[in-house]
Image (tube, rainbow, N blue to C red):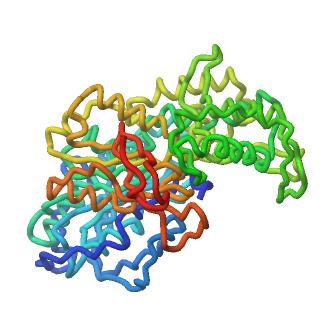
Amino acid sequence: MLSLGFVYLSTLFQLLIPAATAIASRTKPCTHNTFVSLGLLNINVLSLDVALGNAAWPSPSSLLNAYPTTKNYTIDVCQLTVNYTHPGWNDKITTWISLPLDSWNGRFAGMGGGGWVTGSLGALSQAVFQGYAAASTDGGHEETASIESWVLASKGNLNWANIQDFSAIALDEAASLGKAATELFYGRPPKYSYWNGCSTGGRQGHMMAQRFPAQYDGILAGAPAINWDKFIPAEYWPQVVIKELEYYPSPCEIDAITKYAIQACDQLDGVKDGIISMPGLCHFEPLSVVGKTVRCTAPNGTIKISKKAAKFAASVWAGAKSSDGSSLWYGSLHETPLTALGGTKCVSLTSCDPVPFTISADWLRAFISRDSSLDLSTINHQVFNRLFRASVNGFSSVMGTRDPDLTGFKQSGGKMITWHGMKDELIFYNGTEDYYRQALEADPELHDYYRFFPAPGVEHCGGGPGWYPGDSFQALVDWVEKGVAPDTLRAIATPSATGDAHPPLRTADLCAYPKVLTFVGGDPDRASSFTCK
């Protein structure tokens, strides 16, 4: 999972909610002639493939083991593959559109990607199984493409066309092409259009709200990779700290510090469940566990927590700093796995090498240094400071995706739900909270159309011991179509006592920010034992 960088999710469509009732059947044949007029004014269609096909029921990911399904079949679709270019840009974009043959629910869905993957054909399966016409785009490069093949026009020169496609342009065009194809096939446009994505998909959802606010009636944007120009270089900060300390700790040693932090702050919310629900109250001092003995496996042995390892943890929690000590970006929260960004590979407990996180390494090499052969071991604190500022200066308007002015989205009548796991090991939770605060300052009525739900104990887009908001997409649909604004999101977690991933499960109703999930007594595995304050 971490090798990709971001969990590639379009799994937020609920596996347990009934498939939407079909309200229309196809009115045109699934042939090229039906879609011969498909196109946009600013593109040249290079090829259009139209074929009868089927979408396979997507296997539940490991993140959704709590949502078991026995379904194992396919659904017939009219499958479109559109290849096109922007005149003068020398780019090539592929957009996939899947149209259910007999079960269209009158709606359209745009599906997001993860990491450097803009989207994929496979992302459409769960949408069409729920009756949606759906579209996704490759953003101008294949998901297996090397970073330099689409980011660099040549050494030292960026391919700005491809970068713009990935960042924003292709997302807007996929929505327009998808909705146009839907109308051509069914004889009428979709009544409602939705975006669904997590991580990069969450950033994409925010980009749509910020730049193309009329495309979607509802946007679900989980664990959003917004503030891209800041948080991506900040992901490399743990590796800078390791270099400056001249100490490469084993994952076992670092995980032990995290474990002690959780033990120290777990019950601040009144419940011992391995979750730090109120991280603002956690002031654990890692130096307090220096000298503690830790038993390790792979490599096997025992090790005592060192002072340098404690300093490493403290620096990562504090967040990226400039050379003068001022803050550049937020750090990880105390319960997040530090090895995700501060990874090392060890042949013994005292012989380890750094393993940078792939996405941040790609960013510093290709986008910022414009040299895919850059030796990352040369990045000390001073160099990091320069690269961080170059990232902000060069990409805040391209990839930052942090414009807090959502006036256009508000005026279009759109609704957006964002949730973010507070144990997210890849995207800093506080960055999302910071964005929401800024948007709230820009518009005191933000809550009327955009709500943010912190998810205690949840890792990146899912996983961890915390409460995963499994009903988030249906909550969005109800908000858009019935006017039922969600004050809470029903979420599930593994039971606090057994850690068993099978029912019965812990339940909680996640609170809309700025309210906080608060234990009021009773069975901590039941939602009724918590309230929002």
Residue positioned 69% across, 31% down in the render: 314
The image position of residue 92, as x and y in percent, is 38, 54
Residue positioned 27% across, 74% down in the render: 50
Residue positioned 22% across, 63% down in the render: 108
Closer to the camera, 292 or 527? 527
**Image quarter of residue 264:** top right
Counting the numbered discs, the total is 0
- Left or right of residue 308: residue 60: left
Residue 214 visible in the displayed image: yes
In the rendered image, the residue lying farthest to the front is: 522
Residue 237 visible in the displayed image: no
Asked if residue 5 is positioned above or below residue 70 in the image, the reply reads above
Asked if residue 427 is positioned above or below residue 11 in the image, the reply reads above
**Image quarter of residue 225:** top left
The image position of residue 420, as x and y in percent, is 44, 47
Closer to the camera, 520 or 286? 520
Asked if residue 518 is positioned above or below residue 393 in the image, the reply reads below
User: Looking at the rendering, in which quadrant would you find the N terminus?
Assistant: bottom right
Residue positioned 29% across, 70% down in the render: 98
- Left or right of residue 20: residue 437: right
The image position of residue 522, as x and y in percent, is 46, 57
Closer to the camera, 239 or 29? 239
Closer to the camera, 339 or 36? 339
- Left or right of residue 34: residue 138: right
User: Looking at the rendering, in which quadrant would you find the C terminus?
Assistant: top left
Asked if residue 297 is positioned above or below residue 425 in the image, the reply reads below
